[in-house]
Image (cartoon, rainbow, N blue to C red):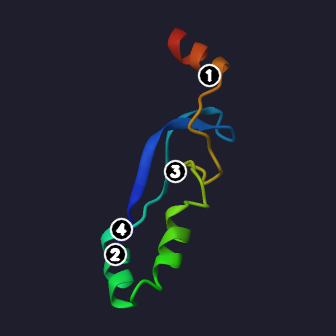
Amino acid sequence: MASYDETGGYCGYCEKRVMVRRAGTNHILHLILTVLTAGLWLVIWAGSAIKAGGWRCPTCGSKASTRVPWKARKAGASG
């Protein structure tokens, strides 16, 4: 079962505000594996916690931003 972090953002491909998401990290699983491997798994845990994939648009799958451009903010407020 995959977990996701979600927040509001902007997709440049769709040109609209969306709920952007990225893959989450199962910290409990990584903690157990770190204890079982006497700390060796800590390197992998740190790598997975960096979130290298970044935020993605759930509609089109392209990279998205958590920052909404000023033009999109003004258009959303008037419409």
Query: Which badge, 3 or 4, is on the more N-terminal residue?
Result: 4
| Dots 3, 1 in contact, CB < 8 A | no
Residue at disc 1, secondary structure: helix
Distance (Cα) linking label 4 and label 1: 35 Å
* Residue for point 56% across, 70% down: 47
Q: Disc 2 or disc 1, which is closer to the eye? A: 2
| Dots 3, 4 in contact, CB < 8 A | no
* Residue for point 34% across, 75% down: 31
| Dots 2, 1 in contact, CB < 8 A | no
Query: Which badge, 3 or 1, is on the more N-terminal residue?
Result: 3
For the N terminus, the quadrant is bottom left
Q: Disc 2 or disc 3, which is closer to the eye? A: 2
Q: Which residue is mark 4?
A: 27
Picture quarter containing residue 33? bottom left
Q: Which residue is mark 3?
A: 58
Mark identifier at residue 31: 2
Q: Which residue is mark 1?
A: 72
Residue 29 x/y as whole percent: 33, 76
Q: Amino acid at mark 1?
A: Ala
Q: Amino acid at mark 4?
A: His
Distance (Cα) linking label 2 and label 3: 29 Å
Q: Amino acid at mark 2?
A: Leu
Residue at disc 2, secondary structure: helix
Whether residue 5 is situated above or below residue 27 in the rendered picture: above
Residue 60 x/y as whole percent: 60, 51
Disc 4: CA contacts within 10 A as few (<14), some (14-19) or many (>=20)? few
Distance (Cα) linking label 2 and label 1: 41 Å
* Residue for point 61% across, 61% down: 52
Query: Relative to the observer, which residue lies in front, 58 or 6?
Result: 6
Query: Which badge, 4 or 1, is on the more N-terminal residue?
Result: 4
Distance (Cα) linking label 2 and label 4: 6 Å
